[in-house]
Amino acid sequence: MPIRSLLITITIGFFVLFFGLNAIVKTEVVVEEKLKQVQVCNEPFSEEALIEAIKQMKFEHPHIVLAQAKVETGHFQSRIFLENNNLFGMKMAWRRPTLAISTHRGHAVYRNWRESLIDYALYSAYYVQEKEEEEFYEHLEDNYAEDPIYITKLKSVVEREDLQILF
């Protein structure tokens, strides 16, 4: 069974068990669209490739997504990123579909950086879809970040590196 079909089957099964049919339809569409938009492969990581993948996936606030990747990975140098292919400091998801294959150092492990990005897209579709920018920041502050100045750091990276101009 191709990996795409396996991922969709696992996602559907998960949602049937926990969320019912209505959530299945929405999530299946999101998973299928994201997998179409970004071919999962083992290409080497580069910031340029990440930016292009973020553009392809059409995140609602791509500059914030890139800032999160930079903050969470210490500008792509952290052990969690280098060992786990984890761009966003994600923990193992239990309430939504995930592409994580295991955990290491308390964080989700992915086969490659692109799967980490797709998993973040699943997170976004499940929790923050259609939020205005400030609502998105508020959600991250209240539900995502452990660091009390996380939003300040994100906004600083966005402004200092002028990330909005990239998208």
Image: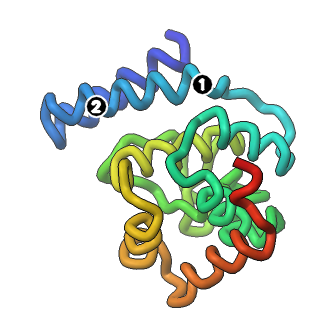
Which residue, as the protein is rendered here, is positioned at the far front? 165
Q: How is the image coloured?
A: rainbow
**Neighbour tally class for label 2: few under 14, some 14-19, many 20 plus, Cα within 10 Å:** few
Specify the amino acid type for callout 2.
Lys
User: Where residue 116 sits in the image (x, y, percent)?
Assistant: 61, 46
Which label number is shown at residue 59?
none
Amino acid carrying mark 1 in the image = Gln
| Residue 83 image offset from top left, x and y in percent | 75, 57
Task: Rate crowding at label 1 as few (under 14), some (14 to 19) or many (20 or more) other CA atoms within 10 Å.
Answer: some
Q: Nearer the viewer, residue 109 or 15?
A: 15
- Residue shown at 21%/35% (left/top)? 23
- The tally of labels here is 2
Callouts 2 and 1 close, C-beta under 8 Å: no
For image coordinates 83% across by 51% down, the residue present is 47
Q: Image point 70% across, 38% down: which residue?
A: 53
Quadrant of residue 162 within the rendered picture: bottom right
Q: For mark 2, give the secondary structure.
A: helix
Q: Quadrant of residue 156?
A: bottom right
- Name the spot of residue 20 as percent of width and height, x first: 13, 35
Tag 2 residue: 26
Element type at marker 1?
helix
Residue at x-position 44% and y-position 29% = 31
Q: Please tell me whether residue 79 is drawn above or below residue 109 in the rendered image.
A: below
In terms of depth relative to the viewer, which is nearer, 47 or 58? 58
Q: CA distance from mark 2 to mark 1?
A: 17 Å
Outermost bottom residue: 148
Q: Nearer the viewer, residue 146 or 26?
A: 26
Residue at the disc numbered 1? 37
The image quadrant of residue 2 is: top right
Residue 51, x across and y down, in percent: 75, 46
Residue 127 at least partly seen = yes
